[in-house]
């Protein structure tokens, strides 16, 4: 990943950052600037193709409502799926977009989604239905709303991993649910800002005591046995994997470097 400016040579450990630090880092991050550029371009195109307000409003509402479902499905069935690490063609992608985040949930560098996966997903989810609702202008608005939803999602996700207690009751609540996903049982609470779909699909748990402690909460299913059968993520991680704690790594030689080393 290319980093420059404020992000150059920084690891950005959320456990040591304040909310102010996060705001500066967030809006200096290249992916956020790219998102804002795409959203601005989409809104500009919507003004060029404008034919009326009603289809634009309908497309924006559609994108705002459907995107939490898209994120839920992706998080549950793709990011926590047990198939991407089984191929050398997709192991690196899976490692980057989710395994590393569960290995070290406080590392801001691997918290953000990768642009080569998020932008196409946003486009595929929003543009076709937006176009059906109201043509090219509505498609552009739906795409822009998908971008803004993603930015809101990413910022809330960052706040959930800060070592601070949010002042907002909403933020405190979603942080509680998300930290349970990371540190208690990863097979639930897949929503980040919206847990409606967890409730509807039976994966929501409001209190850790309602679910057993998961043995795979940090490796999300990539166990020692899986690493022996499908070694590509282990090789990319310098042969290490956090099985008990995101900062405690095991290897045949004992203490090993962090998975971030050598990237």
Image (cartoon, rainbow, N blue to C red):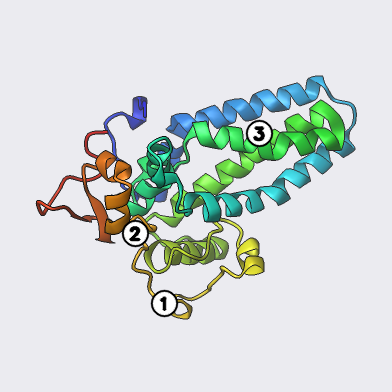
| Closer-to-camera residue (68/116) | 116
Q: Quick one: quadrant of the C terminus?
A: top left
Indicate which disc, 3 or 2, sits on the residue closer to the N terminus.
3
- Report, in whole angstroms, how far the alpha carbon at label 3 lies from the one at label 1: 37 Å
Point out which mark residue 123 bears.
3
Residue 188 in percent (x, y) is at: 51, 66
Label 1: state its secondary structure: loop
Point out which mark residue 212 bears.
1
10 Å crowding of disc 3: few (<14), some (14-19), many (20+): some
> Residue placed farthest to the top in the image?
48
| Residue identifier under label 2 | 218
- Regarding residue 20, the answer to whether it shows in the image is no
Q: Is residue 102 left or right of residue 79?
A: left
Q: In this picture, is 151 found above or below 82?
A: above
The part of the image, by quadrant, that contains residue 201 is bottom right
Q: Is residue 243 left or right of residue 144?
A: left
- Report, in whole angstroms, how far the alpha carbon at label 3 lies from the one at label 2: 31 Å
| Closer-to-camera residue (215/193) | 215
Indicate which disc, 3 or 1, sits on the residue closer to the N terminus.
3
Residues marked 3 and 1 touching at CB (< 8 Å): no
Q: Is residue 64 left or right of residue 51?
A: left
Residue sitting at x 60%, y 70%: 202
Residue 29 in percent (x, y) is at: 43, 33
10 Å crowding of disc 1: few (<14), some (14-19), many (20+): few
């Amino acid at each position: 990943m290319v980093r420059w400016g404020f992000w150059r040579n920084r690891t950005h450990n959320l456990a040591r950052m304040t909310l102010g630090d996060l705001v500066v880092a967030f809006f200096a991050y290249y992916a956020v600037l790219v998102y804002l550029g795409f959203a601005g371009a989409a809104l500009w195109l919507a003004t060029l193709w404008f034919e009326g307000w009603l289809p634009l409003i309908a497309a924006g509402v559609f994108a705002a409502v459907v995107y939490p479902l898209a994120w839920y499905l992706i998080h549950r069935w793709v990011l926590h799926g047990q198939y991407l690490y089984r191929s050398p063609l997709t192991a690196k992608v899976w490692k980057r977009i989710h395994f590393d985040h569960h290995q070290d949930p406080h590392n801001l560098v691997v918290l953000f989604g990768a642009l080569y996966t998020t932008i196409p997903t946003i486009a595929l989810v929003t543009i076709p239905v937006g176009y059906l609702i109201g043509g090219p202008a509505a498609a552009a608005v739906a795409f822009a709303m998908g971008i803004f939803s993603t930015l809101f999602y990413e910022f809330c996700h960052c706040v959930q991993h800060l070592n601070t207690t949010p002042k907002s009751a909403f933020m405190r609540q979603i942080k509680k649910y998300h930290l349970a996903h990371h540190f208690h049982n990863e097979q639930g609470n897949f929503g980040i800002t919206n847990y409606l779909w967890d409730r509807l699909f039976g994966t929501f748990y409001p209190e850790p005591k309602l679910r057993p402690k998961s043995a795979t909460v940090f490796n999300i299913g990539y166990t020692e046995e899986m690493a022996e059968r499908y070694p590509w993520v282990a090789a990319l991680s310098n042969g290490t994997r956090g099985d008990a704690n995101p900062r405690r790594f095991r290897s045949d030689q004992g203490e090993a470097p962090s998975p971030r080393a050598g990237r």
